[in-house]
Protein backbone atom coordinates (compact mmCIF):
# COMPACT_ATOMS: atom_id res chain seq x y z
CA UNK A 1 0.00 0.00 0.00
CA UNK A 2 1.79 3.10 -1.25
CA UNK A 3 0.46 6.17 0.52
CA UNK A 4 1.58 9.79 0.22
CA UNK A 5 3.69 9.60 3.38
CA UNK A 6 4.31 5.93 4.10
CA UNK A 7 4.40 2.64 2.24
CA UNK A 8 3.09 -0.40 4.09
CA UNK A 9 4.27 -3.89 3.16
CA UNK A 10 2.89 -7.18 4.30
CA UNK A 11 3.46 -10.85 3.66
CA UNK A 12 0.66 -13.34 4.08
CA UNK A 13 1.19 -16.93 5.05
CA UNK A 14 -1.97 -18.73 3.98
CA UNK A 15 -4.80 -16.37 5.05
CA UNK A 16 -2.88 -14.71 7.88
CA UNK A 17 -0.89 -11.48 7.68
CA UNK A 18 2.32 -12.92 9.10
CA UNK A 19 4.72 -9.97 8.70
CA UNK A 20 4.37 -6.26 8.08
CA UNK A 21 6.69 -3.31 7.65
CA UNK A 22 6.49 0.44 7.00
CA UNK A 23 8.85 2.72 5.13
CA UNK A 24 8.75 6.32 3.95
CA UNK A 25 7.26 6.80 0.52
CA UNK A 26 9.89 8.35 -1.71
CA UNK A 27 8.51 8.75 -5.25
CA UNK A 28 12.02 9.15 -6.67
CA UNK A 29 13.15 5.67 -5.57
CA UNK A 30 14.12 3.39 -8.42
CA UNK A 31 13.05 -0.21 -8.89
CA UNK A 32 16.52 -1.31 -7.74
CA UNK A 33 16.34 0.77 -4.54
CA UNK A 34 12.92 -0.66 -3.78
CA UNK A 35 14.28 -4.18 -4.34
CA UNK A 36 17.04 -3.56 -1.78
CA UNK A 37 14.52 -2.33 0.80
CA UNK A 38 12.11 -5.21 0.17
CA UNK A 39 14.91 -7.78 0.22
CA UNK A 40 16.09 -6.41 3.58
CA UNK A 41 12.61 -6.68 5.09
CA UNK A 42 12.15 -10.21 3.79
CA UNK A 43 15.62 -11.28 4.90
CA UNK A 44 14.85 -10.25 8.49
CA UNK A 45 12.33 -13.10 8.55
CA UNK A 46 14.38 -15.59 6.54
CA UNK A 47 12.32 -14.98 3.41
CA UNK A 48 13.36 -14.16 -0.15
CA UNK A 49 11.88 -12.99 -3.45
CA UNK A 50 12.23 -16.28 -5.26
CA UNK A 51 11.52 -18.83 -2.50
CA UNK A 52 8.58 -17.38 -0.60
CA UNK A 53 6.60 -14.79 -2.57
CA UNK A 54 4.13 -16.18 -5.09
CA UNK A 55 2.06 -13.07 -5.80
CA UNK A 56 2.01 -9.33 -5.25
CA UNK A 57 -1.01 -7.03 -5.03
CA UNK A 58 -0.41 -3.28 -4.85
CA UNK A 59 -2.47 -0.22 -4.12
CA UNK A 60 -0.88 3.16 -4.69
CA UNK A 61 -1.91 6.81 -4.65
CA UNK A 62 1.55 7.95 -5.86
CA UNK A 63 1.81 7.41 -9.64
CA UNK A 64 5.62 7.71 -9.88
CA UNK A 65 6.07 5.21 -7.08
CA UNK A 66 3.57 2.87 -8.76
CA UNK A 67 5.69 2.66 -11.88
CA UNK A 68 8.91 1.88 -10.02
CA UNK A 69 7.17 -0.68 -7.81
CA UNK A 70 5.55 -2.37 -10.80
CA UNK A 71 8.97 -2.58 -12.49
CA UNK A 72 10.63 -3.90 -9.32
CA UNK A 73 8.09 -6.68 -8.83
CA UNK A 74 8.30 -7.77 -12.44
CA UNK A 75 12.12 -7.74 -12.50
CA UNK A 76 12.93 -9.17 -9.05
CA UNK A 77 9.93 -11.38 -8.29
CA UNK A 78 9.65 -12.64 -11.85
CA UNK A 79 5.94 -12.01 -12.40
CA UNK A 80 3.73 -8.96 -12.89
CA UNK A 81 1.94 -7.53 -9.86
CA UNK A 82 -1.79 -7.08 -9.62
CA UNK A 83 -2.27 -3.32 -9.37
CA UNK A 84 -5.58 -2.14 -7.93
CA UNK A 85 -6.58 0.61 -10.34
CA UNK A 86 -9.60 1.55 -12.45
CA UNK A 87 -10.78 -1.47 -14.41
CA UNK A 88 -9.46 -4.08 -11.96
CA UNK A 89 -12.28 -6.27 -10.68
CA UNK A 90 -12.22 -6.35 -6.88
CA UNK A 91 -15.71 -7.73 -6.42
CA UNK A 92 -16.87 -4.42 -4.93
CA UNK A 93 -19.12 -2.32 -7.17
CA UNK A 94 -18.14 1.37 -7.01
CA UNK A 95 -21.36 3.40 -7.07
CA UNK A 96 -19.95 6.91 -7.35
CA UNK A 97 -20.49 9.47 -10.12
CA UNK A 98 -17.03 8.72 -11.56
CA UNK A 99 -15.60 5.43 -10.24
CA UNK A 100 -12.25 6.12 -11.95
CA UNK A 101 -11.70 9.06 -9.56
CA UNK A 102 -11.79 6.92 -6.43
CA UNK A 103 -8.33 6.19 -5.07
CA UNK A 104 -7.30 2.56 -4.90
CA UNK A 105 -6.47 3.05 -1.21
CA UNK A 106 -10.10 3.86 -0.53
CA UNK A 107 -11.34 0.83 -2.47
CA UNK A 108 -9.04 -1.61 -0.67
CA UNK A 109 -9.91 -0.08 2.72
CA UNK A 110 -13.62 -0.47 2.00
CA UNK A 111 -13.08 -3.99 0.71
CA UNK A 112 -11.10 -4.93 3.83
CA UNK A 113 -13.78 -3.50 6.13
CA UNK A 114 -16.53 -5.37 4.30
CA UNK A 115 -14.54 -8.62 4.16
CA UNK A 116 -13.85 -8.51 7.88
CA UNK A 117 -17.08 -7.03 9.29
CA UNK A 118 -19.72 -7.22 6.57
CA UNK A 119 -21.93 -4.30 5.75
CA UNK A 120 -23.02 -1.70 6.15
CA UNK A 121 -19.63 -0.36 7.23
CA UNK A 122 -17.53 2.76 7.31
CA UNK A 123 -13.78 2.42 6.75
CA UNK A 124 -11.67 5.18 8.27
CA UNK A 125 -8.02 5.64 7.26
CA UNK A 126 -5.95 8.16 9.20
CA UNK A 127 -2.94 9.06 7.10
CA UNK A 128 -1.77 12.12 5.17
CA UNK A 129 -5.48 12.53 4.50
CA UNK A 130 -8.21 11.08 6.68
CA UNK A 131 -10.72 9.20 4.55
CA UNK A 132 -14.17 7.96 5.48
CA UNK A 133 -15.58 5.40 3.05
CA UNK A 134 -19.08 3.98 3.17
CA UNK A 135 -19.94 0.41 2.18
CA UNK A 136 -23.53 -0.75 1.76
CA UNK A 137 -25.05 -3.84 3.27
CA UNK A 138 -24.55 -5.57 -0.11
CA UNK A 139 -20.84 -4.68 -0.28
CA UNK A 140 -21.07 -1.69 -2.61
CA UNK A 141 -18.72 1.28 -2.31
CA UNK A 142 -21.11 4.22 -1.94
CA UNK A 143 -18.66 7.10 -1.52
CA UNK A 144 -17.32 8.99 1.44
CA UNK A 145 -15.34 12.01 2.51
CA UNK A 146 -11.73 13.16 2.56
CA UNK A 147 -10.33 15.50 5.21
CA UNK A 148 -6.83 16.70 6.10
CA UNK A 149 -4.90 14.17 8.15
CA UNK A 150 -3.76 14.83 11.71
CA UNK A 151 -0.22 15.90 10.77
CA UNK A 152 -1.45 18.07 7.87
CA UNK A 153 -3.94 19.75 10.22
CA UNK A 154 -1.32 20.31 12.91
CA UNK A 155 1.10 21.85 10.38
CA UNK A 156 -1.66 24.11 9.01
CA UNK A 157 -2.43 25.37 12.53
CA UNK A 158 1.25 26.16 13.04
CA UNK A 159 1.62 27.88 9.66
CA UNK A 160 -1.65 29.84 9.75
CA UNK A 161 -1.70 31.05 13.35
CA UNK A 162 0.47 33.62 15.06
CA UNK A 163 1.08 31.90 18.37
CA UNK A 164 0.57 28.17 18.04
CA UNK A 165 3.71 26.06 18.05
CA UNK A 166 4.52 23.08 15.89
CA UNK A 167 4.39 20.20 18.36
CA UNK A 168 5.17 16.52 18.23
CA UNK A 169 2.01 14.47 17.92
CA UNK A 170 1.79 12.23 20.96
CA UNK A 171 -1.09 10.77 22.92
CA UNK A 172 -2.35 13.34 25.44
CA UNK A 173 -2.60 12.41 29.10
CA UNK A 174 -6.30 13.32 28.99
CA UNK A 175 -8.93 13.99 26.31
CA UNK A 176 -9.12 17.53 27.70
CA UNK A 177 -5.97 19.54 27.06
CA UNK A 178 -4.58 21.49 30.03
CA UNK A 179 -1.92 23.36 28.06
CA UNK A 180 -1.53 24.78 24.56
CA UNK A 181 0.64 21.83 23.52
CA UNK A 182 -1.98 19.33 24.72
Image: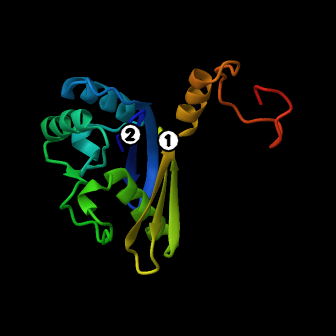
Q: Which of 16 and 169 is in front in this view?
A: 169
Quarter of the picture containing the C terminus is top right
**Picture coordinates of residue 157, whole percent (x, y):** 61, 28
Q: Which residue is drawn at 21% across and 25% down?
A: 30
Establish if 88 lies above or below 3: below
Disc 2 on helix, strand or loop? loop
Q: Which of 99 and 120 is in front in this view?
A: 99
Disc 1 on helix, strand or loop? loop
Q: Which residue is drawn at 15% across and 36% down?
A: 71
**Picture coordinates of residue 48, whole percent (x, y):** 29, 37
Numbered disc total: 2
Q: Which of 20 and 96 is in front in this view?
A: 96
Q: Which colour scheme is used?
A: rainbow
**Picture coordinates of residue 92, whole percent (x, y):** 32, 70
Dot 1 corresponds to which residue? Answer: 127
Establish if 79 lies above or below 7: below
- Numbered label attached to residue 3: 2
Q: Earlier in the sequence, mark 1 or mark 2?
A: 2
Q: Count neighbours of disc 2 (C-alpha within 10 A) and say few if under 14, some if 14 to 19, many if 20 or more.
A: some
Q: Residue at x 64, y 20 (%)?
A: 166
Q: Residue at x 36, y 59 (%)?
A: 107
- Numbered label attached to residue 83: none
Say if mark 1 contacts mark 2, CB within 8 Å: yes
Quarter of the picture containing the N terminus is top left
Alpha carbons under labels 1 and 2: distance apart: 8 Å
Q: Count neighbours of disc 1 (C-alpha within 10 A) and say few if under 14, some if 14 to 19, many if 20 or more.
A: some
Q: Is residue 153 left or right of residue 173?
A: left
Amino acid sequence: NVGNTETSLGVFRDDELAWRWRMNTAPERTADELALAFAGFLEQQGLSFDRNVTGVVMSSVVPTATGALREMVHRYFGFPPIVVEPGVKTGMPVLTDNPKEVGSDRIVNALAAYSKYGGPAIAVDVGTATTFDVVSERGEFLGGAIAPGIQVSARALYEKTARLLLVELTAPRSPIGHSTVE
